[in-house]
Image: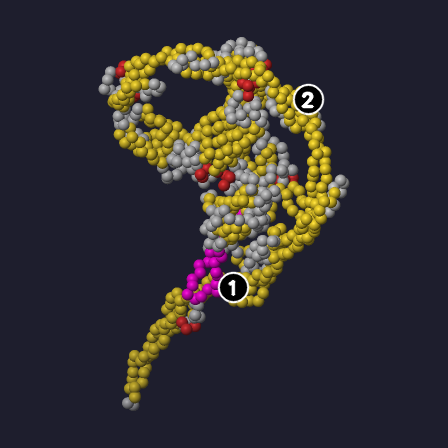
Amino acid sequence: MKLRSIALAVLLVGAGVTAPVAAGDDGRPLADAGLDQTATVGSTVYLDGGGSLDPDGEIVAYNWSIETPSGATITPSDPTSATTRFTPDEVGRYYVTLTVTGDDGKRHSDTLYVDVDRAPELQTPTATPSETTTPSSEPTSTTHGDGDGTTASANQPPNGAIRGPSSVASGASVTYTIDAADPDGEIVDRWWLPTALSASPAAQGELRSRTRSLTVDGTPGTSAEVSAIVVDDDGATSTLSKTVELRNTLPSASIEGDSTAVVNSTKTYRLVASDPDGQITSVSLASDDGSVEAVEPMPWRGPTSSGEWPRSFRFTEIPADDGTVTLEATVRDEHGGVTQVEKVVTVIESTDPQETIDPAAQHAPQILTLEASFIDSPGGINSRQLLFNATAIDNDSDRLVFDWRIGDVAMLRNTAAGDPAHANISYSLEDMQFEGGTTEVTLTVTDQNGQQQRLTKTFEINREDPHGGNIGRGSQVQISRKHGRTIYASYQVNKIHAGEKIFVSFGDGHSETYTLGSTDSYQFKHKYSSAGRYALSVSPTWTSDSATTPLNISKQTYTVWQYDRNVTEVLRTEAAERPSDNWERDGIARIDRDQIGTKTTKTRAIEGRAVMSPGQEWTRVGTTITYHTEKRTKRSTTYPGGDWKLEEQNIDEKQVFAGWEYTTVPQRGILGADWEYVEAVPKAVERTETERSAGRPSGSGWTRGERVGQTQTSYDTRWVDYRFHADADWQYLGADRYISGYGKTTTCVEYIKLYQTRHCVEKETSYHPEYDYRYEYRVPEYDPVYEWVRTVEETEWEYRYRSATHTTEAVHKYTKEVRVGTEYVQWERPVFEKTTIYRWEDTQYTWQETRAFSKPSGEVRNVTKVVKQCGTESANQEPSICSEES
């Protein structure tokens, strides 16, 4: 039976009814794909997700996905309906996943198994005379418990796999599941073997269970095996194994310190970092802005798992552009992991505390990390998904919006809170387009003040597919770049072929043999002696398949750009207004402020504590309570009690819930919309099975009945004297002549004649053989066929529904007056008149004739492009790439 992933945390019991509530408080719906099934190839499998529910809303979307035994993904006839069907076309286990979406957008998935076998072939117990049955050269004979010797097929051992993540981080909690079946019986026992993935031994009960949960304890960059043994009902065993790679967890880091500094002041900032699965091997905290200088070195004292490192900086001037400087920290761990974080500091000119209010409110969020990894889950569509993780901080916002642009195919959004804020989002590989096995991700983080920061990274998607090849790779041979007549190429391989050889033919008569190492790709290069079109071919020794890619080696050319470049002279000044029309604004130099008054406000309070603060710039100056009288109205079927007064009777009628009416039906969906589905109810049913065979059928509980026929088992050879003595089912092989006796002939060789009568005086006797025939036949031998009977107990399902019953009661109107006091906190803040002093630039342009080998950028004019071949000019007038042709 399928193990359901739905957890029931609370049972609400009322009027004899038990209703499930989803575990936790995340409000996710409960997906129910139904029970596991068995089927045959070509039959129709019906799927029913109608048992899914949303405890705090309703289901608004269904999505079915099916993974075949060969690893392909198919869809049923109606993938977005609560009920659907599909027809399996191959033998094995199908993984059917249902994902439901609630009206609040939250999702939940459930997976069922469909085990598919071939339809049984009809067998005739007795062979006809025209049929020829060749007995097995090595029959397997078994003797059943009742003592009759019968011939049965050999037992097939169990098979299966271990489901769970293939890549884990040290310290993570993971669960692995034994997914096994027996082709000709059932699994009766299983146990887990010790694994280097965890240092803690498992409990005895967990070693015999179908699932095993453990905490990963290993060295990143290594691998370990998770193994288990399964036993079938005939005693055969199989060992299932799964290789798990241990990946490195990047160190975490943050920079602590003030976000605002006064020009010419010195402040101390502290780098705080830790590594969950190793030691930190190096740290750095610095800034490449010329407006800040470090006044002391980092106090680094060697590797450690965590620590804090202070460093002081002096802010020498107000920076250009936006008036901020960026402190950057880099933390590296012993396994090659690198984490980089930033902190933006606003530099102001005055020491007046009021001048720090607005600049701090203008800080943009900081993106600390952006990483990508694969999601590994037992089957379903989640097994080929990328998980993108990001971390960001913002000093003046408690919630950040994360916008993810994945290549040119997806634009996704989610939000996260916290300090720092962690956000992640997943995307399926089947819907993505790749070029060279990479995808570019642009992350934009926006705070509550509208400030943004953007980060773009390119990720290489190169993961081995369990069915062969690499996910995200188009061709095994990749030409990474060309330099003149020299090409640089790589060949994508699986690490399992480490130590084996590949034969590379470059197409120009030259070839080489390379030995592979333990890597995802093998890099090589080759220089061609002349231009032309070639075919680069790679042939591995472990298969007859080869990978070939064409390439063109052309005569080396280069481009000469001739143009006029604008040479500029920049004049700078500071002022609140534009000095003249030629001047352009270039950032803020400083902000001058004068207090011109005070602004007051108030916010709701509870027991003297403010429900919310209007902001950091507001100062609390007291509390006040405002009273007013409210007339309140209540509609009720009974007297509410207290100060409520009856104002009007029988103003309405109300349907009051009285209880539930229950019924059980044999088929779902046959009742009307007033009935609500509750659960499936099992019912045990006995069924009699019969089978005709010479030996006891497989399985238990069979009883032998009367003889109903016979079945041919072997042949014997027999000789007969007359052909008509052979039965109809005998097969004639040939005849043989043999001497059955001898005939005797006596003749007289000498006579005498006496009294006119001849008398023989000497006789001679001769003998001659007499022949007869016998006939050889192939005679079939038969075993008796009996009718076997057994009683099988099966489970049938009925479906329980309930319908609410109501009674009608009169509704009355009640009123009362209540004196209500509302408590407020009083706030005030100074009001400033702000004057922004800008930096201004006046740029003066002159033009200069220039010649270069790269395309010009910036302000240019009269651009001329000339393409030349190498060797047409002197060596000092040509670029370095032409030296390849010499």
Mark 2 falls on what kind of element?
Answer: strand
Is any part of residue 729 visible from this angle? yes
Mark 1 lies on residue: 783
Q: Tell me the residue at 43%/16% (across/down).
A: 585
Q: Amino acid at mark 2?
A: Gly
Q: In the image, which disc is placed on residue 622?
A: 2
Q: Amino acid at mark 1?
A: Asp
Q: Nearer the viewer, residue 336 or 526?
A: 336
Magenta stretch? 113-136
Of callouts 2 and 1, the N-terminal one: 2
Mark 1 falls on what kind of element?
Answer: strand
Q: Tell me the residue at 56%/45% (across/down).
A: 59
Above or below — where is 595 with respect to 10? above
Q: For residue 747, what is the image quadrant?
A: bottom left
Query: How far from the left and from the top, in percent, is residue 730?
Result: 43, 67
Query: How far from the left and from the top, in percent, is residue 678?
Result: 62, 51
Q: Tell me the residue at 46%/12% (across/down).
A: 575
Query: How far from the left and from the top, in percent, is residue 792?
Result: 60, 58
Is any part of residue 228 visible from this angle? no
* Label 2 crowd (10 A; few <14 / some 14-19 / many >=20): few
Q: Nearer the viewer, residue 158 or 553?
A: 553
Q: For residue 832, what is the image quadrant?
A: top right
Query: How far from the left and from the top, in percent, is residue 257?
Result: 58, 17
Is 260 colored magenta in this rendering?
Answer: no
* Label 1 crowd (10 A; few <14 / some 14-19 / many >=20): some
